[in-house]
Image: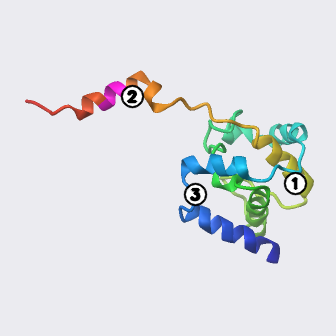
């Protein structure tokens, strides 16, 4: 259980707002490279159907991976997957599955992490979305009857 303590401390900082949504990506770039193999991680991503919730690019679907605080570093990502299994190993989940070591080895999690770290945001700059700009402009005008 001791191996999860550091991960929980980092998780607490992330959840408490220690990293902003835009700062996470920058922090991830500064994080140490994964010891995993991104090509092997891609296979794992598809075999475990991660794309069904996270999309093929990590930014579509139910839960976005791009910019996630759980990807701050490899250890936090591994602790997140393992802690879920430690806390809820026998009960089925309707959300993200549990990943005990019997399901994904540490090496496979490192590979998966390396692959997920290749994802990049494709979100356009807000200024380049004409419809959004029209809405903002319209909303900024005084309402007249």
Evaluate whether residue 38 shows in this view: yes
Compared to 94, does 130 lie above or below? above
Of tags 2 and 3, the one toward the viewer is 3
Instruction: Give the residue number, with chain letter if any, for mark 3.
Output: 19
Per the image, label 1 sits on a secondary structure element best described as loop
Q: Dots 3 and 1: beta carbons under 8 Å?
A: no
Is 135 one of the magenta-colored residues? yes
Badge 1 crowding class, 10 Å Cα cut-off, few under 14, some 14 to 19, many 20 or more, is some
The percent position of residue 99, horizontal first and vertical second, equals: 81, 57
Q: Position of residue 45 (x, y in %)?
A: 81, 41
In the rendered image, which residue does mark 1 sit on?
104
Q: Between 97 and 133, which is closer to the camera in this rendering?
A: 133
Give the SS element for disc 2.
helix
Mark earlier in primary sequence (2, 1): 1
Q: Residue at x 62, y 38 (%)?
A: 61
* Numbered range of the magenta stretch: 132-136
Residue to which mark 2 is pinned? 132
Can residue 1 be seen at all in this image of the molecule? no
Q: Earlier in the sequence, mark 3 or mark 1?
A: 3
Verify CB contact (< 8 Å) between mark 2 and mark 3. Answer: no
Up the image or down, 67 lies above or below 138; here it is below
Q: CA distance from mark 2 to mark 3?
A: 26 Å
Residue 88 located left or right of residue 39 = left
Furthest residue in direction left, as rendered: 145
In screen coordinates, is 11 left or right of 131?
Answer: right
Mark 2 nearby-residue class (10 Å; few <14, some 14–19, many ≥20): few
């Amino acid at each position: 259980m001791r191996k999860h303590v550091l991960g929980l401390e980092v998780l607490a900082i992330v959840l408490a707002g220690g990293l902003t949504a835009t700062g996470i990506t920058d922090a991830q770039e500064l994080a140490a490279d994964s010891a995993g193999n991104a090509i092997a991680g891609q296979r794992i991503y598809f075999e475990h159907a991660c794309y069904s919730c996270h999309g093929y690019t990590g930014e579509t679907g139910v839960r976005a991976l791009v910019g996630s605080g759980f990807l701050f570093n490899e250890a936090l990502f591994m602790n997140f997957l393992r802690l879920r299994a430690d806390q809820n190993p026998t009960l089925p989940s309707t959300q993200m599955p549990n990943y005990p070591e019997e399901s994904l080895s540490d090496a496979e999690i490192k590979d998966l992490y390396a692959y997920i770290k290749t994802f990049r945001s494709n979100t356009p700059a807000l200024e380049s979305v004409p419809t959004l700009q029209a809405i903002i402009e319209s909303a900024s005008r005084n309402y007249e009857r």
